[in-house]
Image (cartoon, rainbow, N blue to C red):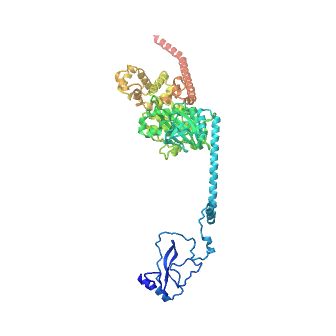
Amino acid sequence: MEEWTSILGVSSSDPRTTSLTHSFFPALYVGESPYGLYAIDVLVDHHTITYSPKLLGPPLLEGSAPIALSKEEIEHYLPPKRPIVTDILSITHKTIEGEFLLAGPEPKNKLLSKNIRHDDLSFFSIAEAIYEKYPKQLLIATFTILVLFFSVVWMCGKQWGHSSAISSAMAVNGEAQTSRQSNSSLTDFRIRDYSNVPEGWMSTGKIQYNPKDILGRGCQGTVVYKGKFDGRDVAVKRVVSEFVKFAHREADLLRESDAHQHVIRYFCMEADSQFRYLALELCIASLNDYVDNDEVRRAVKISSIEILRQAADGLAHLHASKIVHRDIKPQNVLITSANQSGVMRTVISDFGLCKKVQPGKNSISIGLTSGLVGTDGWIAPEAINSNSTSYPVDIFSLGCIFYYVLSNGEHPFGTPIERQSNIINKQVYLDKLQLLDDYHLAEKLISSMIAHEPSERPLSSHVLIHPFFWSAERRLAFFSDVSDRVEKESDDCPVVRRLECEAVFVCGSWRDKICDALREDLRKFRTYKSFSVRDLLRAMRNKKHHYQELPKEVQNSLGELPDQFLYYFTSRFPKLLLHVYTAFEYCSAESVFRNYYSDEVRQRMEAIVAKEEEYHKEMQSKVEDEEWQRAKTKTARSPHKLDSTKKNKKKKSMP
């Protein structure tokens, strides 16, 4: 430092003292770098004349250029160039587009006024600045905001008008108390009594529900919660207001059909500005849960066959009420909790897609409002390929459910990915049914239910009384009635011929398939034909009616009535029941057999029976004519025989 002070001619004790020839004084230099402005201490020659021309940009980092020193003096007296300051603690100001500071009292350059920014942060100044720089983008953004604003206003007005219209319609309609409750809750949804609502629950009218306890979800934003109605545990189905038409239709159809024990019970409907709420009977599980969850299966005290029978019963009630469900699937067949008697029920639920067949019509047209309904993999082929649907679409879906339950989760049309394609292409797989005791009955029933052509499917009433659902007592009673009916008939009787048709495949030599004890007991009373279905049925009928008189050994072989007794024969002749049932459709119109067959079967067999009877009469008449001709011919020939006999006697008597 002393060396520099000696070179510059500055006293080390007082930096402000200078010599006459070489005197410097301290000053502050303000410069600019890419990081902004900065200031440093400098020493300036008092006698050096410097200037900074205007409008040539900011001063240089090395300071003003001296103009009164020679080259030798500059090299000898001036210090070397100082390095640029890079370690700047903070930025106090940033220049904008070439702005620089003007030293001294010089007047502000008018040319720089456009580049100097003021702290005017008002909305209009900001908008003006944005418009100057981005005019096109600002106009587009403004237009978009206006469109969105008016769209929201229009939608709110439409929703309010729609809600008002619904409220007015419900007030006028008001046929049921539930509708009046719904209307009052709609108009007074802003004023509710939350005093009795549990913490965390929601309340609408008389319906309360827990939004965290979700029982299931449906299409179009439908959610089912666990809730309460008048202190009763219920399932609360919440439907979005946009689909209020479907919610009201579902409520009307439920109100019309829920008197049946196998249709889910409906309590009431409430509404607010956004949703409609339906209070329905609370169930413990769906058919899907029953098949997939072993714990649910153990908790349900109903057999699989009884579950299917009750589901068919509920569907038959809907069809009798002219209602087509259109979305039968395992998730929509529910199992209720046990009542006070410990009885559980299977019920049909989810009427959101149901539609009523209009009087005088047998089908529902598929239009914009009906559309393609149902769940993929459970939809009948005509629902995709045809312009109208009817009751057979439900029969098809129910047939798929039958196989799904009996096969423990399998589907008759394969995996979920290929199901709908296989439905259209008629690719059916029923091999899992072979594990059932009633394989032939189940296979025949399900095959008819999932037939590709709707006309080939049975009615729901026919499905309900199919022998697959018969108890052991009913099956034995049917065998006895059939045996009594054909016991005295001739072998050429139409019903006997139908019964004995394919007897070889049905029972074969049935006496060889029964136990020795029963075979010996049968020989004591009468003779039975080994290849006759009629005689097999007679043997079953006689042993059932005289069961208490049988030897103990025979009773032990046959087992107890009715289940073990029936299983003794059906296990040896698995095709017997189906064969006899099909053959005796011929007698379905007779009073004894009316309870075994549906009206559909009687109507179908009417023409067949008439044709068979006519043919039988013709054959009988032909046989009688042939017998009469033979008798007449025999009578005409008898006198000649007598004459010849007399002549022979005379010849023998002659000597």
> Residue at left 47%, top 38%?
287
- 319 or 334: nearer the viewer: 334
Can residue 451 be spotted in the picture? no
- What x and y, as percent, mark residue 230? 52, 33
- 530 or 234: nearer the viewer: 234
- What x and y, as percent, mark residue 293? 43, 40
Height in image: 370 above or below 570?
A: below
Q: Quadrant of the N terminus?
A: bottom left
Q: How many marks are shown on the rendered structure?
A: 0
427 vs 179, left or right, is left
- Report the residue that reaches farthest toward the left: 553
- What x and y, as percent, mark residue 318? 56, 33
Height in image: 104 above or below 473?
A: below
- 651 or 190: nearer the viewer: 190
301 vs 384, left or right, is left
- What x and y, as percent, mark residue 205? 56, 37
